[in-house]
Each structure stands twice: as C-alpha cells, then as structure tokens.
Image: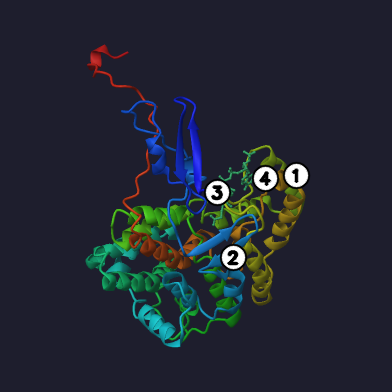
Amino acid sequence: MPDTLTILDNRTGKKYDIPIENDAIRAMDLRQIKVKDDDFGMMTYDPAFMNTASVKSRITYIDGDKGILHYRGYPIEQLAEHSTSFLEVAYLLLHGELPNSPQIDAWRHNIKHHTFIHESIKKLMEGFRYDAHPMGMFISTISALSTFYPEAKEILNPEVRQKQIYRLIGKVPTIAAFAYRHSKGMPYIYPDNNLTYAGNFLSMMYKIGEPRYTPNPVLEHALTVLFILHADHEQNCSTNTMRSIGSSHIDPFSACAGAAAALWGPLHGGANEAVLRMLDEIGSKDKVPEIIKGVKEGKRKLMGFGHRIYKNYDPRAKVIKKLAYEVFEVTGKNPKLDLALELERIALEDEYFVKRKLYPNVDFYSGLIYEAMGFPMDFFPVLFAIPRTAGWLAHWQEHLDDPDQKIARPRQIFLGAAKRNWVPLNKRS
Ligand code: ACO
C-alpha cells in the first residue's frame, strides 16, 4: 500500500495524492489544492493546535490515553524513583542521554558556577513593590538578564549558547528565592554551592541566622522529585511559546521570560495555585456535592482536573499523590488533603467527568505539598518555572538546530471587511 492520502476535491473533481510521513501529511502539500490558478490554495484551520504537529521532537513522549510520560525514552516513574538529582534529569533532557560520572561532575560544576546573580540584578529586584506577585518578579528579572549578557544574542554560536544554558539553569532558583525573600522583607541569601540544586534552593528560601542551612532530607528529596516531574511536557503552551519566540532568533533570556509568562496562566502552570484557592473556598467535605453540581452546570471548572493530552490519570499526579504522604510525615498532614481526596473520589465516579475523561492532573496534588512545605500560594507557579526552564531550553535548542524550522508564523482565515474607502469624520454614522 502506498504511503499516501488521496484527496478528492468535490468542487473541481480533481484528485491529489499527498505523501504520508509519520502518520502526518504536510500542510504545505495542501496548497496545490485550488479551484482557480490564482487561488491562494487550501489551508488547514486548527485553533489551539488541536491536531497540528508543528515540530518533530526527540525529547519527551506522551501517550495521553494510556497515561504514559517518557523523557528521552525513560519513564517518568523511573526517573522520579531513581534519579539522584534534578541536574541529572536536566542533562538528560538537554543532551539526550543520562550523563556518566565525569559528565555529571562537569555539568554540576558549570551550573553551580552560574548560580550567583549580578548585584545590580539584586538591586533591580529591590525596586519591586513589597506585594509584587513573585511570578511577575521572576518573569521580569529573567527578561532583564538579557541586558546583563548581551552576547546571549549569538544563539548560533555553540559556546555562547551553552553558557546561557548554564546561566539560566543556575540562576532561576536564585531569582525565585530572591523574589520570595523580597516579598517577605527578608535579606537575600546567596547560593550555597555545596548543597544540591533543591537543597540550595531551600537554603536561599528559608535560611535565617544559622551559619549553614541543612535541608530536611525528606523535603529536599520531595522537591527534587517535584522538579523532575515538572521538567518537561513536550509541546505545552509555555514550551510552544519558548519555541515560537526563539524562532525569531532572540536571546534565550527573553524567550524564557515569554515562556514563563505563558506558564503563569490559570489554565496552565497557574492551576496549582487555583486548586488551593478552590479548596480554601470549598472549605469542608459537605460542600463537595454542591461544587460538583456547579461544575456540571458549567458555572466553574474543577481546577487541577482535565488535560489537553491526558485522557487518563496523569502519571505525574500518581507520583505526587504518593510523595504527599512522605512529606506530611515531616510537616504534618495538610488538612486540605482529605477534601482533595473526597473531591477526586466524587469526580471520578461522576458521569460528567467519566464521559469527558477528566482526571486529576499534575497540579491537583502538588499545591498541597508546596503549602505543607511552607511555600505561599502565589509562589507555586514559580516552583513550576524553575525546573521547566531546563525543558524550555531543551526545546529551544532542538528548534534552533532543526533545518525544517523557520520563524513561527501561522496563517489566518480573514473574515473582516473587504477594501473600502476612508470616510471623513463628519460623514461617519
Ligand atoms: N472542570 C470541568 N469541566 C472541564 C474541565 C474541568 N477542569 N476541563 C475540561 N472540562 C470539560 C469542558 O468544559 C468540555 O466540556 P464540553 O465538552 O461539555 O464542552 C470538555 O471537558 C473538554 O474540555 P476542553 O476545555 O475542550 O479541553 P481542553 O483540552 O481545551 O482544556 C484544560 C484542557 C485547559 C487543562 C482544561 O481541562 C482546564 O481548564 N482544566 C482546569 C485547569 C487546569 O487544571 N489546568 C492545568 C493543566 S496541566 C498543566 O498545564 C500543567
């Protein structure tokens, strides 16, 4: 059987054989389909990219129906269980293979070499209002990094590119922690490069007067696992933004700031914050049926439920649910856990959710852990952005090296006014 798709245009009676590659046809192959020679040619209309592959990628694989997630072929459950550090997973995403011993040592060394930020960036952060949202501070500061490293615009120079990758992965926890300390009015804590990536972050967040901060090993491990789970998720809204901005050949700091802005929205990485606000609003188990009724009547969404790709339990949510119990052993149980479990139980039995294949996503339980660990609610999207920076960079790099790619520029179907002549003000109705 030939690997082609035959299209019959009933307007003209013409037949077209379109090649099929990787179960896809190239949208540009449809352009030949015309009624008249001077027609523009056929396009596809796909708002929100529901069925359009815009890249060929080798980084992350998801089977949404089966609830499968792999980074570079490795199941997320294995990485969460066995990976000893977030930086190992970041290396995997960016390089395609797990690092051997000298490779991880060099990678760690190079990233730790770039954890400090310029004192002027610190001063810039001091300029934010006392109540500025930490994600707003994070996005603006990432963007400002481009002014400190103007060479970053040389995105096709491999050495320069590599250095910005070290800088971004190294500096995002520092910027995130400084945003937190700023909102608390507490002095900034400089990085401690003898700690792990997650441990150093906890130190910059919570160290007070002690000469050396020692992270609780259970919480440090939990944060490492959460970072691993959030590191990448193929062509989601923020990654698509990173690729799209990066396709204009801007520096990676500016592209990352845009990706982080996309992540902040409540339909994306802002959902973990929205889940906790929703649980606070519900308050007690007896209110759950009323909330579910409101959701079914279309009055609101159940935050932390549903996913564009997963039509099964999000594999990350399974790992997080288990992790929550380990964290609560140390911090004490988050009282909202019982409410979340009840909400999940009722939703998963309800026909509305079953029919639409709506399951808990990564954000449903992560906020409960974050809250138990002392992170304020508005800080949750920042906790997502720190590890996702590695994923954004892996996609940015893949995009720049892909000979198929050009500047991202979708088409439109124009339905506005046809050409008309300008009317003077006194003649307008
Ligand atoms: N609560 C109630 N109903 C829902 C929910 C929800 N959380 N999510 C989807 N639905 C319903 C829709 O109303 C729609 O119903 P209909 O067919 O009767 O119109 C149906 O399920 C299909 O939903 P869509 O909106 O078409 O799904 P889409 O793929 O566009 O949206 C999204 C996915 C944005 C994640 C959506 O499920 C949602 O808004 N969830 C809540 C926010 C959330 O948790 N976001 C985090 C996602 S994970 C992440 O980004 C890290």
Residue 128 in view here: no
Image quadrant assignment for residue 132: bottom left
* x and y, in percent, of residue 50 in the image: 52, 45
Q: How crowded is mark 2: few (under 14 residues within 10 Å), some or many (20 or more)?
A: some
Name the N-terminal-most of marks 1 and 3.
3
Name the N-terminal-most of marks 1 and 2.
1
Mark 1 or mark 2, which is nearer to you?
1
Image quadrant assignment for residue 333: bottom right
Task: State the residue position of label 4.
Answer: 356
* x and y, in percent, of residue 397 in the image: 36, 64
Task: State the residue position of label 1.
Answer: 351
Query: In this view of the protein, which residue sits in the foreground, 186 or 365?
Result: 365
Task: State the residue position of label 2.
Answer: 371
Residue type at tag 2: Glu
Name the N-terminal-most of marks 1 and 4.
1
> Ligand 1 within 8 A of label 3's CB?
no
> Ligand 1 within 8 A of label 4's CB?
yes
Q: Cα distance, mark 3 to mark 4?
A: 36 Å
Residue type at tag 3: Met
Task: State the residue position of label 3.
Answer: 1
Question: Are circles 4 and 2 on residues that touch, CB within 8 Å?
Answer: no
Question: Are circles 3 and 4 on residues that touch, CB within 8 Å?
Answer: no
Q: Cα distance, mark 1 to mark 3?
A: 42 Å
